[in-house]
Image (cartoon, rainbow, N blue to C red):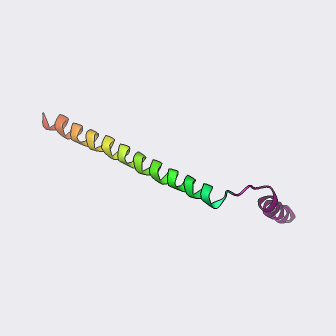
Amino acid sequence: MNKVITFLKDSVEEIRTKVTWPKYNELQKSSTLVLVASFIFAIVVGLVDFVFQNGMTWFYGSF
């Protein structure tokens, strides 16, 4: 149990002193970038799914 308490104390100390937290504007830019990249990725995956679904429907419908 002593090791767990030591680990938790060291973790809190590291978060308070050694972690560099981003500024608000940097965090906002990063969040916007992630949002845009996620949206683009979702569109690409949706298009691939659409093409694959229509291709399979056409392929199995030709028999």
The residue stretch that appears in magenta: 1-21
Q: Which of 25 and 9 is in front in this view?
A: 25
Residue 16: image location, x then y, percent? 79, 62
Residue at 36%, 47% (x, y): give it: 43
Residue 36 image point, x, y percent = 45, 51
Q: Determine if the magenta segment contains residue 20.
A: yes
60 part of magenta stretch: no
- Does residue 22 appear to the left or right of 32 in the view shown? right
Q: 57 or 35, which lies in front?
A: 35
Quadrant hosting residue 48? top left
Looking at the image, which residue sits at the far front?
Answer: 25
Q: Is the magenta stretch mostly helix, strand or loop?
A: helix
Count of numbered tags: 0
Residue 17 versus residue 41 in the image, above or below: below
Q: Which residue is located at x 22 percent, y 37 percent?
A: 55
Instruction: State which quarter of the image contains the N terminus.
Output: bottom right
Q: In this view, does 19 lie to the left or right of 44?
A: right
Identified at 75% across, 56% down, the residue is 19
What is the quadrant of residue 2 in the picture? bottom right
- Taking the image as shown, residue 12 lies to the left or right of residue 44, namely right
Q: In which quarter of the image is the C terminus?
A: top left
User: Which picture quadrant has residue 12?
Assistant: bottom right
Q: Is residue 10 left or right of residue 38?
A: right
Residue positioned 83% across, 60% down in the render:
10
Q: How far across and how far down the image is residue 60, in percent? A: 18, 37
Residue 59 placement (x, y as % from top left) = 19, 34
